[in-house]
Image (cartoon, rainbow, N blue to C red):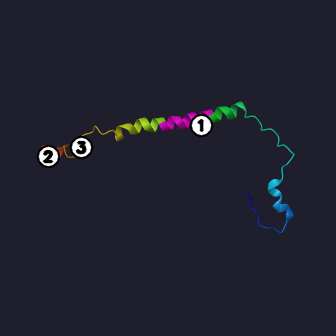
Amino acid sequence: MIRRREPVPFAFVAEADRFRSNVTPPPRERASFGQMAGRWLLGLTIIAGLAGSLVIGMPALSSDQPSPQTQQSQATDGH
């Protein structure tokens, strides 16, 4: 199925999607040791924060606590 393109007033706009450059970009610069260490440290800090919040939050998510109806306050004991 061939789709016809809408006519455009400028020929270079119509041919722009077929244009391929013969200029290759320069190779990416390698990260230094300090940058790599910083990335690892940031990643470990984020993972440790998520794990810590999970460990601290687990007691609040557990359902083995007594329900509010069976819990007695000190006022009902006469203290």
- Give the spatial CA distance, label 2 vs label 1: 52 Å
Relative vertical location of residue 70 with respect to residue 11 in this rendering, above or below: above
The residue where tag 1 is placed is 42
CA neighbours of label 2 inside 10 A, class few (<14), some (14 to 19), many (20+): few
Quadrant of residue 79 within the rendered picture: top left
Viewer-side residue, 54 vs 20: 20
Relative to 42, is 8 on the left or the right? right
Q: Position of residue 18 (x, y in %)?
A: 82, 54
Q: Which residue is mark 2?
A: 76
Lower sequence index among marks 3 and 1: 1
Work out whether mark 2 precedes mark 3 in sequence or the reverse, and give the earlier one.
3
Identify the residue at image location x=35%, y=41%. 61
In the rendered image of this protein, does residue 20 appear above or below residue 42?
below
The residues tagged by marks 3 and 1 sit, at their Cα atoms, a distance apart of: 41 Å
Q: Amino acid at mark 3?
A: Ser
What is the distance, in whole Å, between disc 2 and disc 3 at their CAs? 17 Å
In the displayed structure image, the side of residue 32 where residue 76 appears, left or right: left
Which residue, as the protein is rendered here, is positioned at the far left? 78
Look at label 2 and name its amino acid: Thr
Instruction: Please tell me whether mark 3 or mark 1 is closer to you in this view.
Output: 3
Residue 74 screen position, x and y as percent: 18, 44
Q: Which residues are magenta?
A: 40-50
